[in-house]
Image (spheres, rainbow, N blue to C red):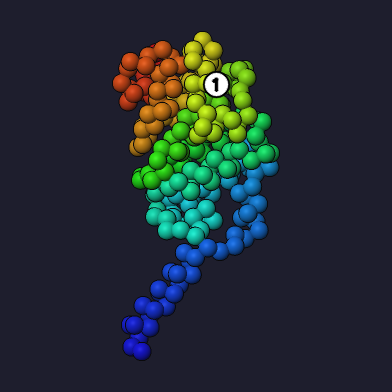
Amino acid sequence: MPGVEMLDLKKKLRSATMSAPTTVAPETTGALEPSCRKTAARALTIVRDGVITGEGPTTKGRIHFSRALDADDAAWCARILTVSAVEHEPVSRAEIEALFEISDAAAERTDDGRFDDLLAKAVAHHAASESGLPVPPRTVALSPDTDIESWAPTKAANIDTKVLEWIASQMRGKRHSNHRLAALVATLVGVAALPLAQLPGMLDMGML
């Protein structure tokens, strides 16, 4: 067999091996099974890295392009955020930051909006808990079957201003606009009629 053809064959075999489902190493499996909110945030960064590179334990067994977010990525995020160890804990700031990083890393989406829905609900869960308001378990609050309006705060008076400012700073300048989240923030500050694109900057500057 000519040298060039042999090289091509080796490349194809190597590619097939890399894309085939494999058993995740024990240390990686543990990293993706959080025991607390801190390890949940760390697990989300593994998903983020998979979105950026198209490689890693959260992309095994399927074709995954770099800078792309698919339904399985969104499912990984939901699974990490709702494991029993953190189910009854409010979503932490570190977890929210990791979700925003995932959102910013994904130039293309094929998840039918599941990630944006999850991010908006996670942000609302964090904002409510940080403001001293009761929140339902994560398995309820973050579920795609639960309407965010059924439990999320609806009045700015109930939310800590500093929390809103932090959310606005996270939203500002992002490549992908999460309309679900922007609409939630608009409702909280009572300006739902404003163009959604103006909200992050206006909130961050304290104009609302």
Q: Dot 1, crowdedness within 10 Å: few (<14), some or many (≥20)?
A: some
The reply to whether residue 102 is visible in this rendering is yes
Q: Position of residue 104 (x, y in %)?
A: 41, 40
Given residues 118 and 35, the one toward you in this image is 118
Q: Position of residue 177 (x, y in %)?
A: 36, 32
Q: Position of residue 140 (x, y in %)?
A: 59, 30
**Residue bearing mark 1:** 151
The reply to whether residue 205 is visible in this rendering is no
Q: Residue furthest top?
A: 157
Horizontal relation, residue 208 to residue 33: left or right: left
Tell me what residue is drawn at x 66 percent, y 36 percent: 86
Q: Secondary structure at mark 1?
A: loop
Tell me what residue is drawn at x 36 percent, y 89 percent: 1
Tell me what residue is drawn at x 60 percent, y 34 percent: 139
Q: Residue furthest left?
A: 195
Give residue 88's quadrant in the image.
top right
